[in-house]
Image: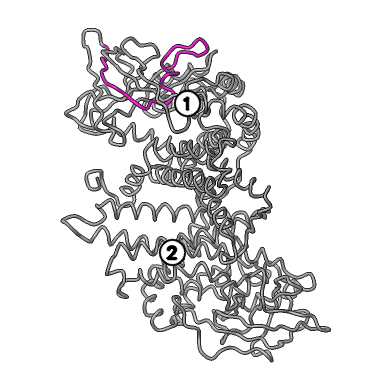
Amino acid sequence: MYSFEPNEEQKMLIEAVGKYAANDLRPAGRDAEEGGSLPPKLINKGWELGVLQASIPEAYGGFGDRSAVTGALAGEELAFGNLAGALVVGVPSLFALPILLGGAEEQKQEYLPKIVEGNWTPYTAALIEFAFDFDPLALKTTATLAGDEYVLSGEKAYVPFAKEAQAMIVYAALDGVTQGFIVPKAAPGLTVADEAEKMLGLNALPTYRVKLDGVKVPKANRIGGDSGLDFERILASMRVANAAAAVGVARAAFDYARDYAKEREAFGVKIAQKQAVAFMLAEMRTEIEASRLLTWEAAWKLDTGKDDANVDAYLASTGAADMAMMVTDRAVQILGGHGYIREHPVEMWMREGRGFAMWTGFAMV
Amino acid sequence: MTIEFEAPKPIAQTQFVLKTVAEEMMRSKSRYFDDHEHEIPWDYIEFMHTAMKAMGAGSLAPKERDNGHDDGEQKEKRPPIAYQALAAQIEMLAWGDVGFYLVTPGGGLGAAAVQAAGTPEQKAKFLARFMGEKPTLGAMCMTEAGAGSDTSSIRTRAVLDEKTNEWILNGEKIFVTAGDKAFNEYEKLGKGFLVVWASIDPAAGRAGMRSFVVEGGTPGVKVTKLEEKLGIRASDTAAISLVDARVPFDHILGSPTVEKTTTGFKGAMATFDATRPLVAASGLGVARAALEFLKEKLAESGVEIRYGLPRQKLTNIEREVIDCEIMLKSAWLMVLKAVWMADNKHPNALESSMSKVKAGDVGTKITQKAVEILGPLGYSREFLLEKWFRDAKITDIYEGTGQINRLVVARQILGYSGAELR
C-alpha cells in the first residue's frame, strides 16, 4: 500500500519531540550559536526523549526496534527546533547505530547498553576529511592489518565532541573499502586538536580535527569483526538523517518567513499579499514537501531492505541539501534587511542550509 | 495508518499490462500522429475501449459505488485506491504518448465534473454510457477567449426558459480537450457529452456559476475550430460555440438557484482538486520517457551516472541527470500523496495544487534539459524526444497554469481568501 500518515507511536514521538524542539531547543538556539555550546541540562532533556533508546532492542538496554522512517520523523522535528541541538542530542547515535546495524554480537553487548542506559555521554564518529573532494567511499585515512592489529593513519575533520568522547568510530579505507574501527579515548597516536573548529554555521556543535598517527587497535575493534561492515548502508542512513534534518531546518525558515510576511506591511498591505512574496512562499512549501516525501521513501526502503535504498538515500540527501539552501535563502530574502540581522534566526538557518551539502556523517537515524 | 511506499498489487499488475500497450500501441504510432494532426488514432481508441470494458473499467474516472457502474459486490475492507490506480495508469499511458492518452475513451474531465458535482441520478444517467458498446468520450468546456485562469469572468450565459423548462445556453468556449470527439458524431464512437460552464446570474459573480451537461449533437452547438498546437497533436482541442442551445432542466449540475454562497463555483474547484494530480501524473509520464531516453543514449555512448559520488566529483552531465531524477521521483511522490488523500477523503486542495506546480516545473525542465544534453540528437525528429519536449509544456498550462496553482498554494499556506491574495 501507499500511505502517508505516521502510525500512532510515531505521532506520539513527533508530539513529544516537537514540544521539546519548540519549547526548549528553539529558545536556546541563538545563545548556543553565539556561545558555542548548549547547556548540559538541555542536552540531557533531549536525550531522555529516548529517540536513540527506542531504536535499540531490549537485549541491548534499549526499548524498541530501529526504524529509519521513525528516525527521519524525529530528526525533522528536532532540527525544526534547532539544528545544533538536534545533532548534539544525537551524537551517541553516530557510534551506536553503526554497531547496532553492522556490529559483531560482542560489540553490541559491550557498547550498546552502556550508551543507552545512562545519561547522555558523547560517543562519536570520525568520517569527514578536510579536502574539497572528500568522498566517504574513497577515504584518504587508511587502515592496514599488521598481525593482530589494525593500524590507522590519516587526518579527520569535523569530528563532533572528539575531545570528550569515550570512544569513536574512525572510518578508514581498508584495501580501498571504507570500514569502521572503534578507537578508545586517548589511544596512543590519536591527537585531538585543542580548539574546536570554527565553521560557517552550527557553532553549538563542537567539532574537532583529529590526527591518527599509526593508531593501533585490536582486530576485534573492526566493526562487524572479520567480515566487516556494509558501509554503504550506514552511509545511506546518514544521508536519510541529513535529509530529514534539512527538511526540519527548511520548515523552520519557511514558517518564520511566512509569519513575518503576514505581519509586515508595505504599500498598505501585508507583503504576503504581494504575489512576488506569496509565490516564493508557495515554492518553498512545495519543495519542502518534495524533499520530505523523498526522504520518507528512502527511509522506508532502508527499513524494508530494498535494493535501491542506497541510491534513493543519496538522491534524498542531495535534493534536500539544495532545497534547504533555496528555502533558507528565500527566508532571508523575504525578511529583507531584517533577515540579515542576527536578531532574527533566518540568517542562522541560511548558514546551516549550505552545510547539508557537506556534513555527511553528522547525524544518523 | 503508517508510512509506506509499496505499490498495491492491483496497481503493479495493471502497470505491467499498460507498459506493453504503451510500447506496442502508442510509441510505435507517436510520430505518425504528431505529423498528421487531426487524424484520429482509432486503433488505440478501440483497443482501449475493449480492454477497459474487459477489465470492468468503463472510463478513466474513478468509480464510486453509487454511479451505477459497480456490481455492488465491493465488500472487502481494503483501503480505497481508485485515484492512486488512476494516477499510475495515466502516468504510464502518458509515458507511451500523452496525446493518445488524452483521447482515451472515457469521461475525461466531463465525467469528473459529473462525479464531483452531480446527484446520484445524474451520475447514473450520464456516466453509464462509458460502459457501452462503442468507445465514448466526455469533455469539459470552461475556458473562454477572455477567461483562462480567471474562470470567474466566464461570459457564457444560461437562462431558464420557464415555458419549456429548458436552459438556453449562449457563449463561445475554447481549448476544449477532446471536445470534437465528445460532441460530434463519429461512426465509431458512442454519443458523448460536454460539461459547459456558464453563469445563471452574472450579477452574482462566482455564486452564479454552474455547469451543464450538453449532450452530443445538441442543436445550436457547433465545433467551430480545431486548434493546431505545439504538441499533444493526437488530441483534439476544440473551439465550441453555443447559440440558443437548449438543454433539459435536470442537466444542471448543482443547485438551479443562486444562493449567497459560492458553492457552484466551488464545485468546479473541487473537481480540480481531484483532477490536478492526475494531470500532474500525465506530465510526469512524459518526463519519465524523456529522462529514460536520455539515460539510454548516454549509456550507449559509455557515459555512466555514478550515483553516490559527492557533487564535487560528478561531471556536469551526471549532476544534471541526478537532479532530474530527484525532481521526477519527488514530484511523483507528491502526486501519490495527493491522490492518496483523495482516496481517503482528506481535503487535498494544497497537496493537489502543489503536485501540479511541481509536475509543471519538472515536466518542462526535464524535457528541456534532455534535449539540451543530447544536442543534435535531442533536436532531431529522428527521435521522439523533441516531441516530448513539445508535449510536456502543456502540463504547466492546462488544468491551471503553474502560476494559478502557485496562487492556490499560497492562499492555502497563508490562510488567505481570493480577496486577500489576488
* Residue at image location 57% in from the left, 36% down from the top: B384
Q: Which residue is mark 1?
A: B235
* Residue at image location 74% in from the left, 76% down from the top: A222
Circle 1: element type: loop
Q: Are marks 1 and 2 in contact (CB under 8 Å)?
A: no
Estimate how packed mark 1 is, as few (under 14), some (14 to 19) or many (20 or more) residues with alpha carbons within 10 Å. many
- Say which quarter of the image contains residue B206: top left
Q: Give, as a single range, the part of the protein colored magenta.
A: B166-192
Q: Chain of mark 1?
A: B
* Residue at image location 33% in from the left, 17% down from the top: B251
Residue B320 in magenta stretch: no
Q: Quadrant of the C terminus of chain B?
A: top left
Relative to B361, is A166 on the left or the right? Answer: right
Residue B172 in magenta stretch: yes
Cα distance in 3D space between marks 1 and 2? 41 Å
Circle 2: element type: helix
Relative to B270, is B189 on the left or the right? Answer: right
Q: Which residue is mark 2?
A: A325
Q: Residue furthest right?
A: A147
- Say which quarter of the image contains residue B246: top left
Q: Amino acid at mark 1?
A: Ser
Q: Amino acid at mark 2?
A: Met
Disc ID at residue B106: none
